[in-house]
Amino acid sequence: MTKRIDGKAAALDVRQQVAKGVEAFRKQTGRAPGLAVVLVGDDPASTVYVGSKGKATLEAGMESFTHRLPADTTQDELLSLVERLNDDSKVDGILVQLPLPDQIDADAVLDAIDPAKDVDGFHILNAGKLAVGQQALVPCTPYGCLHLLKHEHDDLSGKHALVIGRSNIVGKPMAQLLLGENATVTIAHSRTRDLQALAREADIVVAAVGRAEMVKGDWIKPGATVIDVGINRLPPEEGKSKGKLVGDVAYDEAAENAGAITPVPGGVGPMTIAMLLRNTLVAAHQREELEAPAI
Ligand code: NAD
């Protein structure tokens, strides 16, 4: 029978381990790890994400610093805030919520974050370290996916993994992490030919595209593990104000073939915040030259 992978439970477990780590860190250093989150503008989804991140940070026993800037903030103003946060000894992690308004060059902002505080793992130094197999702060969503996969498989070595999507924040780091676990990795993207055939060969499918229910049930090899990163809102049904949230995988169909599969919502989503807290705890330990707990 197909197993529904419970991302909420896995995330809760990580968050409890982080909270314990925070307590120990506080005892050792006399202070709590601190996470600064910067929101520019009032995009509704970003506002919700930033609120949840702040709440989760406090629940883990960390200090939370939220900076809400107006939509017309200039690049220089944002860069000077990043510089202040880089210099602030109470701040161990800095996250600038994406997307940023058009007048701001997101790459320049991400590059300005101190790589030691780059808890999103988007700085090119951390991306480069991950690519060459050095210890790095790893992007939270793919790291959360790897955590779920390792829970399902004692050993990913030699498994054929298909990552659908090649973005810098999900697809590429996901592929690097799977390579690091000795999986045989195929990366598919918008120009890939015959995606279905590739999917049918895969022991592991990670879908990170942003297209509602694109991956069909008969693409999935019997027994494969399916990790669905996509978050897509369908048009509202009659009489409803909001449409249903679905992933990139047609869940009901795929569940008939898969050995294990993440639902949307309740799969990868909760893992992202859990891994952000984990990265902040790790960054805090590294800044204090202490050994971080293995989470
Ligand atoms: P993106 O738009 O940056 O990248 C999408 C990728 O999909 C691209 O590399 C593109 O080449 C590929 N693609 C597009 N059409 C394709 C097709 N027909 N066949 C194969 N590949 C195709 O998106 P992203 O930021 O990587 O996010 C992907 C999805 O994951 C989105 O739905 C996003 O909302 C979701 N997401 C979820 C979380 C979470 O916490 N659960 C975090 C980040 C992103």
Image (cartoon, rainbow, N blue to C red):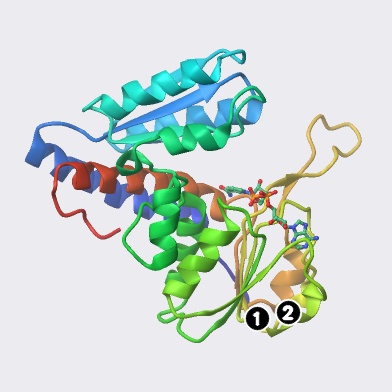
Secondary structure beneath disc 2? helix
| Residue drawn at x 45%, y 80% as measured from the top left | 182
- In the rendered image, the vertical position of residue 227 relative to residue 204, given as above or below: above
Q: Position of residue 59 (x, y in %)?
A: 34, 34
Name which residue type carries label 2.
Answer: Leu
Locate the N terminus and report the quarter of the image it occupies. bottom right
Name which residue type carries label 1.
Answer: Ala
The residue carrying mark 1 is: 202
Q: CA distance from mark 1 to mark 2?
A: 7 Å
Locate the C terminus and report the quarter of the image it occupies. bottom left
Is 167 left or right of 22, judged from the image as shown?
A: right
Q: Position of residue 204 (x, y in %)?
A: 60, 75
The residue carrying mark 2 is: 198
| Residue drawn at x 75%, y 65% as measured from the top left | 252
| Residue drawn at x 73%, y 46% as measured from the top left | 232
- In the rendered image, the vertical position of residue 130 relative to residue 116, given as above or below: below
